[in-house]
Amino acid sequence: MPETGSWQVRWQSAQRSARAAGDAALRRWRAAPRRTRQTWRLTAVSAATGLAVAGGAVAVSGPWDAGQRTAERAAAAGSGSGSGGERHGASTDPVRSAPPVLSALGGSAPGGPGRAGAPLPTGAGLAEVLAPLLKDPALGPLRTASVRDVAAGREVFGVRADEPATPASTVKLAVAVAALSALGPDHRIATTVVDGTGKSGKSGKSGKAGQAGEARDGGDTGDTGKHRIILVGGGDPTLTARAPKPGPAADRPANLRTLAEDTARALKQRGTTTVTLGYDASAYSGPDQHPIGPNENIAPVSALMADEARLDDSEFGTAPRDAAPAVAAARAFAGQLRERGITVDGDPAAAHAPRQAGEIATVRSLPLAALVERMLTHSDNDIAEGLARQTAIAAGKPASFAGAGTAVRDALAARHLPLTGAVFADGSGLDRDDRVSAGLLSRLLLDASSDRHPELRSVVTGLPVAGFTGTLSGRYPDKSSGAGTVRAKTGTLTGVNTLAGTVVDADGRQLVFAFMTSGTTDPQGAQKALDTLASAVAECGCR
């Protein structure tokens, strides 16, 4: 055996000293009064937050990383101008790094002994802290709450937790869990070009036609010549026609440019350079217009669209939308074919692909888990409606507002979730007829936070980080105790404010929470009151 060098002796000595110091610090932490521990924890969080803000330009990720750094997701997995609707005008500032959130994803709080080994908060302790905050006059007459302990798997505090209320965008948590349950986190949505030669058949159930050019009546309305091709939308709400951004190809959404390139190559190999183009958006049925009407928060729901039918260069938030997404996507695709040497005769026409049509080229979306993350981080209404319909397709139900609502409910019922009084009128939460309880929201988050359900993990990793990402980037000032430690889905409609997410308390215990209020008249005041409630759960070692 080789002789131990002097540097090794010094290293071993340093290791022993570090372990001794760590053990002493842990003993001081456990022996300190609860309020002292809270002060230490808040000081550490504030310091980490300050460092994160200063280094915000470092290691930022784009929206297709769902606003989360790859390291955050790996750490999480390792731990087991329209009107009438919600405006998700999320900040477009670069995402700031949030070190404290890594503990909230499944580890312990700074200095804590671990989420399962930490003391369990009591209902009385939580009530002492939260009950006065629920009396804030900025909240509306309906105030409901539910806080659950992840390790224990049970509710430790509740106020009217079983009472259904309008969830606004927190209903997206239900859609996310339903879609992941029905399809799995690795599912990808295909957009395909097929050979349209010959008589077209009715492929699937037909629905009522939506906007002009979105024909769904089951008939091929265009030329059926021998060089006819059909662009078939599978319902990918993240399909893009824009030039790819720098970065790994595996992290990019499906692109019409790629599809056109592959299609042109295949056609040329067949000796074909002139085609007519049809497009098939019949995978979805029923009305395509959301009940709120034309609105900058959401495009007409179509199985074929590019860039969410946005008429500007935005990627999330409100934007003017094209009234006929499938037509716009088909025209964009025709333009891409022409750029690649394929002549497209005439304008694209609505069609149904033949049942046994030969595939020419296909692109597929990012995995469903990535779509869920983007949907939750930016409260993306178009993705939400798309995933609700994908859930319906998986269940063999009509891919309409009604069919999607039934499919979402059925998927959640299969998980034995509390659905009394629940109504899923849409997938985005823009419909005021939606109803869920705070108890259901906290149960959804409980399942997603549990090591027993890794298929749901993207529900947690997709949650906005307070003060840093998505719809929480403009909330929780830098010095707020909740900044960087609260992860939560927001919900906002006129008179409705909700917040549901996950925290690690002062003792290192992981908790999930849901707070809902209706009848509010001061939106900013209501949001601040909900943020204060979530911060209080994070600060609390409530026993």
Image (cartoon, rainbow, N blue to C red):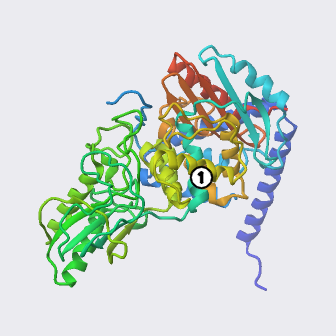
Looking at the picture, tell me which residue is in the foreground, 307 or 422.
422
Looking at the picture, tell me which residue is in the foreground, 479 or 1.
479
Q: As drawn, which residue projects farthest toward the top? A: 137
Q: Quadrant of the N terminus?
A: bottom right
Q: In which quarter of the image is the C terminus?
A: top right
Residue 99 appears in the figure:
no
Q: What residue type is labelled 1?
A: Ala
Q: Does residue 225 sit above or below 175 in this rendering?
A: below
- In screen coordinates, is 132 left or right of 217? right
Looking at the picture, how far across and down is residue 243, in whole percent? Answer: 27, 58
- In screen coordinates, is 423 left or right of 295? right
Residue marked by disc 1: 178
Residue drawn at the location 40% of the way across and 34% of the way down: 89
Looking at the picture, how far across and down is residue 253, in whole percent? Answer: 39, 60
Question: How many discs appear?
Answer: 1
Q: As drawn, which residue projects farthest toward the bottom? A: 1
Looking at the picture, how far across and down is residue 327, in whole percent? Answer: 24, 53
Q: Does residue 303 sit above or below 481 in this rendering?
A: below
- In screen coordinates, is 112 left or right of 302? right
Looking at the picture, how far across and down is residue 400, in whole percent? Answer: 45, 49
Residue drawn at the location 28% of the way across and 57% of the way down: 241
Residue drawn at the location 54% of the way across and 43% of the way down: 172
- In screen coordinates, is 223 left or right of 462? left
Looking at the rendering, which quadrant does residue 78 occupy? Answer: bottom right
Residue 151 appears in the figure:
yes
Residue drawn at the location 84% of the way across and 31% of the way down: 33
Q: Is mark 1 on a helix, strand or loop?
A: helix
Looking at the rendering, which quadrant does residue 497 occupy? Answer: top right
